[in-house]
Amino acid sequence: MNHEYGYFEEDQIGRIGDIKLWRNLLVFILPQWRWIALAVILALGITASTLLLPRLVQLGMDRYIIDSSLGTDERIEGLARLGGIFLAVVLAGFVVNFFQVMVLEWTGQRIMHALRQHLFQHILQLNLSFFHRHSVGRLVTRLTNDIQNMYEMFTSVIVTLFNDGVKLAGILGILFWMNWRLALILSLTFPIMLVITVYFGRLSRDAFRRIRTHLAGINAYIQEIVSGISVIQIFLREKDAHGQFRQLNDRYYQSALYQIRIFGIFIPLIEVMSSASLALIIWYGGGEILREHMTLGVLTAFISYMRLFFQPLRELSQKYSIVQSAMASAERIFHLLETREMLPVPPEPLSPARVNGHIAFEGVEFEYEAGRPVLKDLSFEVQPGETLAVVGATGSGKTTLINLLERLYDPLEGSIRLDGTDLRRLDLRWLRDQIGLVMQDVFIVPGSIRENILLDRHMPEEELDRIVRLSQLSELVKNLPRGLDTKIGEGAMDFSAGQKQLLAFARVLARNPRILVLDEATANVDTETEMLIEQAIQAAMANRTSIVIAHRLSTIRRAQRILVMDHGRIVEQGTHEDLMARGGLYSHLQSLQNGDGRGGGLRLAASDSGEETV
Ligand SMILES: Nc1ncnc2c1ncn2[C@@H]1O[C@H](COP(=O)(O)OP(=O)(O)O)[C@@H](O)[C@H]1O
Ligand SMILES: [Mg+2]
């Protein structure tokens, strides 16, 4: 099964006879079997009460209205008694019906709740490359619409189909029991009904598919237009867009009309069949009455049962399409659940108690897309406590290197070791807990500053104060009326890019990981916070193995060693002075940055303010 998760996926129609799909569904349905059994028993109760009513009418007619062997008072009294029973049955039917609906909806909700939970948990574990290929919108659809579709199928279709099935079987049984000859004659119409229903079922599936396809087309077009609206307006393409939309809209309209036509024929046709059956009953049944083989009451009951019989058939073809769309949803959901794009988990994951922070890359090769290598034969080491800077042009593979260190991906070739142990043998959560990562974009969780620093960790207040001080947030916090408990993003309180960086450093200090990674953390910072950040970096780097990807010369210079990357390879390494003296790519990058008329090489020499970029 290869799904192209395009917009047109919504036009897929599931196969009702897909056994594997039903087996998958059963896993979620079976735990609820007690409730489903209860619903089935209640369904039998509902059917019994529905089928009892015409029978009561028959008794009333035959025993008390037509039969004149009893006295008038007795007959009226008997009718009153039957009327009472009738009312009681109706009420009982109502109560049972109420409970059945409640039980079913409740069960349906529980099944979908479990499925949604399962699916979400599954998605959380998938590896990053999966998310590069699947859009957010589609994943959201899986968790919301698709599950809703299945819920609808469960409550409105499977259930009514079951109820109707029981009802139809019950009616047939009663009809044969009351008068088998008449029932047999009626049965002659069944094959015709069957052919009609199957034929129209096909047509309606076809119509349904067309409607879905055209609707998906409209959706895709709207999306395309809205996201490019400025281009449309600037280039005065409104009229064009309008025309194209009209075409799509017309097609959708035509397919809706087609469906209406189909139902416009099908429903009256069922009506005709129902009336024709009625004619059969009156013709043959009337004769049976005259031949005194049957009573008038039985004929009346027959007619009532006939009406009950045709009612579910009328709704059948509509339900058919609900089932199909639900099966398509189920197929997509289970397809997603079957996706096993996860990093291999070691049989016995290690989580060493002590970490020195020695990092080694050995002959690492990596590619995001097959045939387009991003890292090539990359080897380097970082000693415990050392600070390593990585520089290189955009796209040279710096962030990729960090992604591999965090084990968001595994290398294609070679290995990455922490204190001599291959990352693939370590516990993933443990590994990520050892690395404090500060990126350009800082993820703020909704909540107070305190919550944002601690992220569910607990620590004594003095310790937190120390961290706030070290990360240079004290000034900021002091001026807030509610201090650390101020909610970020509320009212006047919003963090600037630089302040967010400080917050990120506070987080690192609070977690106290052995390894610190800065990925262009200081790229877009206002000059006011710059100094503060310098100090926060210093605090964060102390006693840690640090890998710093930076633009700022001041940050780079603090590193004991600098790696220069170019197209996924290390082309140079050494200290700032070494590399400058060498006159290679590093010094070239420097002069490029500085030769743009902002002050030339002079600034490089005098740059402790951190303005320079590499
Ligand atoms: N998720 C991805 N899928 C495919 N290619 C990617 C992905 N992320 C990065 N790349 C490619 O990998 C190369 C290195 O990217 P990156 O490591 O982000 O570079 P840097 O951080 O040095 O700017 C670039 O050519 C980039 O286009
Ligand atoms: Mg990058």
Image (spheres, grey):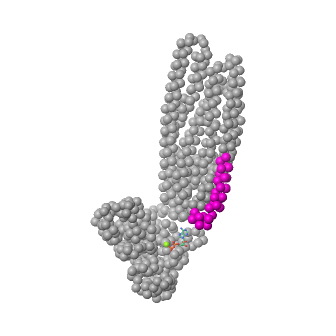
The answer to whether 342 is drawn above or below residue 272 in the figure is: below
Give the number of callouts: 0
| Front position in the image: 448 or 264 | 264
Give the residue displayed 53% in from the left and 62% down from the top.
131
Rendering coords of residue 81 (x, y %): 52, 19
Rendering coords of residue 21 (x, y %): 59, 49
Q: Is residue 230 visible?
A: yes
The dominant secondary structure in magenta is helix
Q: Is residue 25 visible?
A: no
Give the residue displayed 31% in from the left and 61% down from the top.
482
Give the residue displayed 33% in from the left and 61% down from the top.
485
Left or right relative to 516: residue 214: right
| Front position in the image: 21 or 228 | 228
Q: Start and end of the magenta stretch?
A: 229-257
User: Quadrant where the N terminus lies?
Assistant: bottom right
| Front position in the image: 128 or 453 | 453
Kindly indicate the quadrant of the structure image that contains residue 474: bottom left
